[in-house]
Image: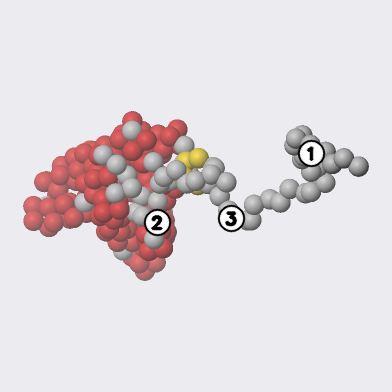
């Protein structure tokens, strides 16, 4: 029998099951900071804009209270300061949400943990602001409230540390790399001013620092969300 050589390619096998890639194996390369395998950015530009506006709005409300009533007001002015301070703290939560989703402080375990620790510190400070703003006068200064009051300055110092880490990590670009450091120097600038010069100067310094620092940071997030990618 004569042997014949066929040049027709073999048909593809249809009886062999397709094996899915192992779990955890990326189907597409990671394209940069803040992105996951084939999932796109960890947070959308629209979300960054909204959170940035929340930061600016909360900051401006507290700054307005400081300009009108001062930082050491009593009575009604004190309660306004407490509750607008709470709005500011909610704005800081919005900032932390962006920083966590974009890993602004870096990708190491320490960089991630420091943001979560700050959430706890800020949460306790926010509880103080809320309670101090709504409780009757006789309950505003009990032992529990005095303990919670400590977390206000501690949370701001924590934000200062985060600002330094954001600048060193360099994952945020342009002005957004450095503006958190400017914004989060509020306690470092305002507290010594109060100690040295009293309310008459520190109220203006603290209010304007909020506008230049945190309110502007929120505006930058709203206008240039791509700098957090």
The residue lying at 17 percent from left, 51 percent from top is 190
Give the percent coordinates (x, y) of residue 74: 26, 49
Give the percent coordinates (x, y) of residue 146: 33, 65
For this rendering, which residue is in front, 190 or 171? Answer: 171
Query: How far, Cα to Cα, is label 1 from label 2?
Result: 59 Å
Give the percent coordinates (x, y) of residue 198: 11, 52
Q: Residue furthest front?
A: 2
Query: How far, Cα to Cα, is label 3 from label 2?
Result: 18 Å
The residue lying at 50 percent from left, 40 percent from top is 40
The residue lying at 79 percent from left, 43 percent from top is 13
Quadrant of the rendered image containing residue 2: top right
* Mark 3, residue position: 24
For marks 1 and 3, the one nearer the N-term is 1
Which of discs 1 and 3 lies nearer the camera? The answer is 1
Residue 5 marker: 1
Q: Decide: few, some or many residues near mark 2? Use Cα within 10 Å; few <14, some 14-19, many ≥20.
A: some
Give the structural element (helix, strand or loop) at label 1: loop
The residue lying at 73 percent from left, 48 percent from top is 18
Q: Residue furthest top?
A: 223
Which of discs 1 and 2 lies nearer the camera? The answer is 1
For this rendering, which residue is in front, 14 or 45? Answer: 14
For marks 1 and 2, the one nearer the N-term is 1
* Mark 2, residue position: 107
Left or right, 201 with respect to 128, comes to left
Left or right, 46 with respect to 125, comes to right
């Amino acid at each position: 029998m004569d042997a014949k050589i066929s040049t027709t390619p073999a048909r593809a096998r249809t009886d062999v099951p397709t094996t899915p890639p192992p779990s955890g194996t990326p189907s597409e390369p990671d394209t940069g900071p803040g992105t996951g395998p084939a999932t796109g950015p960890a947070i959308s530009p629209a979300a960054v804009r909204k959170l940035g506006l929340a930061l600016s709005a909360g900051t401006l409300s507290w700054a307005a209270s400081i300009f009108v009533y001062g930082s050491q007001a009593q009575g009604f002015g004190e309660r306004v300061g407490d509750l607008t301070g709470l709005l500011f703290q909610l704005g800081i939560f919005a900032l932390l949400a962006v920083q966590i989703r974009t890993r602004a402080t870096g990708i190491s375990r320490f960089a991630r943990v420091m943001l979560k620790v700050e959430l706890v510190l800020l949460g306790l400070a926010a509880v103080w602001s809320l309670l101090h703003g709504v409780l009757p006068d006789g309950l505003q200064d009990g032992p529990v409230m005095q303990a919670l009051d400590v977390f206000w300055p501690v949370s701001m110092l924590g934000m200062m540390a985060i600002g330094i880490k954001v600048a060193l990590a360099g994952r945020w670009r342009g002005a957004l790399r450095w503006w958190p450091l400017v914004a989060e120097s509020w306690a470092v600038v305002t507290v010594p001013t109060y100690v040295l010069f009293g309310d008459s100067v520190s109220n203006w310094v603290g209010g304007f620092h909020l506008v230049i620092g945190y309110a502007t940071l929120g505006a930058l997030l709203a206008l240039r969300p791509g700098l957090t990618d």
